[in-house]
Amino acid sequence: MATDISEQAPRDKAVRQLKKRRDFYGHLLIYTLVNAFLVVIWAITDLHGFFWPVFPIAGWGIFVVMNAWDVFWRPAITEEDIQHEIKREQEHEHGHG
């Protein structure tokens, strides 16, 4: 039974990561479809005018990049990170207490 518990934490972490990845791909799909639709509207209404879709593309694109960083490149929190933060908080409390 201990094996089941010890395997649950890595499994939960993997499930969370898979969900984040799936959510990111959904976000990316919506971003692409909505912005493609805006570009089509621009092309139909004022092809030679100012390319105004650049604003939602760039603005929303910042959030897509931040989401991608969180899903694919953000370093995982390790036990060492947690212990370091606990120690830092304890030192902060004792320094001002």
Image (tube, rainbow, N blue to C red):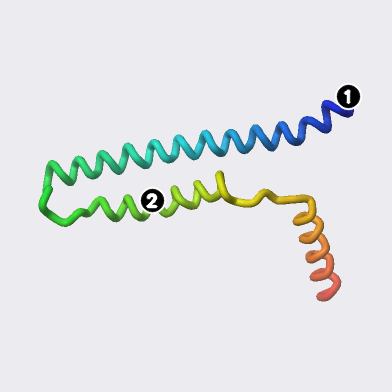
Kindly state the secondary structure of the residue where label 2 is placed: helix
Q: Position of residue 66 (x, y in %)?
A: 49, 52
Q: Which mark is residue 1?
A: 1
Q: Position of residue 43 (x, y in %)?
A: 15, 44
Q: Position of residue 65 (x, y in %)?
A: 46, 51
Quadrant the N terminus occupies: top right
Q: Which mark is residue 60?
A: 2
Residue 90's quadrant in the figure? bottom right
Distance (Cα) linking label 2 and label 1: 47 Å
Left or right side of 81 for 31 = left
- Residue under the image location 25 percent in, 43 percent down: 38
Kindly state the secondary structure of the residue where label 1 is placed: loop
Residue farthest to the front? 73
Left or right side of 8 for 41 = left
Left or right side of 29 for 37 = left
25 and 30: which is toward the camera: 25
Residue type highlighted by circle 2: Trp
Q: Which mark is residue 65?
A: none
Residue type highlighted by circle 1: Met
Q: Earlier in the sequence, mark 2 or mark 1?
A: 1
- Residue under the image location 31 percent in, 40 percent down: 34
- Residue under the image location 46 percent in, 36 percent down: 25
